Image (spheres, helix red, strand yellow):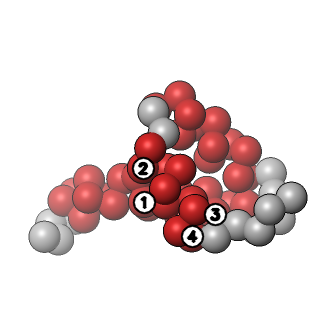
Amino acid sequence: MKKLSYSNLKKKVKSANKKEFYALVIALWWIPLGSLWSMAAIWIRYSNNIKRFFGYK
C-alpha cells in the first residue's frame, strides 16, 4: 500500500467527478485514521462553500 500524502489526495479530489469523490471518501474511511483523511477530502472539495456559508471570504 502506498503512503498517503495530502498533495496526492488533493490532486485526486480535485480531478474526481461526484461518483469518484464519494467512492474515495468511503474508501478512505476504512483505513486507520481514515475519518481524518475523509474529512480532509471533504474540506478540499467543499472548502469554498463552507467558508461562504459561515461568511468568510
Q: Is residue 50 visible from the viewing direction of this image?
A: yes
> Circle 2 — which element?
helix
Q: Pick the residue in front: 11 or 49.
A: 11
Task: Say if 37 sits above or below 13 in the image.
Answer: below
Q: Amino acid at mark 1?
A: Ile
> Are circles 1 and 2 on residues that touch, CB within 8 Å?
yes
Q: Amino acid at mark 2?
A: Lys
x, y percentage for residue 16?
Answer: 48, 39
> Circle 3 — which element?
helix
> Circle 1 — which element?
helix
Q: Amino acid at mark 3?
A: Trp
- Give the mark nearest the N terminus, 4 or 3: 4
Label of residue 52 in the image = none
Q: CA distance from mark 3 to mark 2?
A: 15 Å
> Circle 4 — which element?
helix
Label of residue 6 in the image = 4
Q: Pick the residue in front: 55 or 40.
A: 40
Quarter of the image with the C terminus in it: bottom left
Kindly identify which residue carries mark 2. 14
Kindly identify which residue carries mark 3. 37
Quarter of the image with the N terminus in it: bottom right
x, y percentage for residue 12?
Answer: 53, 50
Please name the residue shown 73% across and 45% down the image: 27
Kindly identify which residue carries mark 1. 44
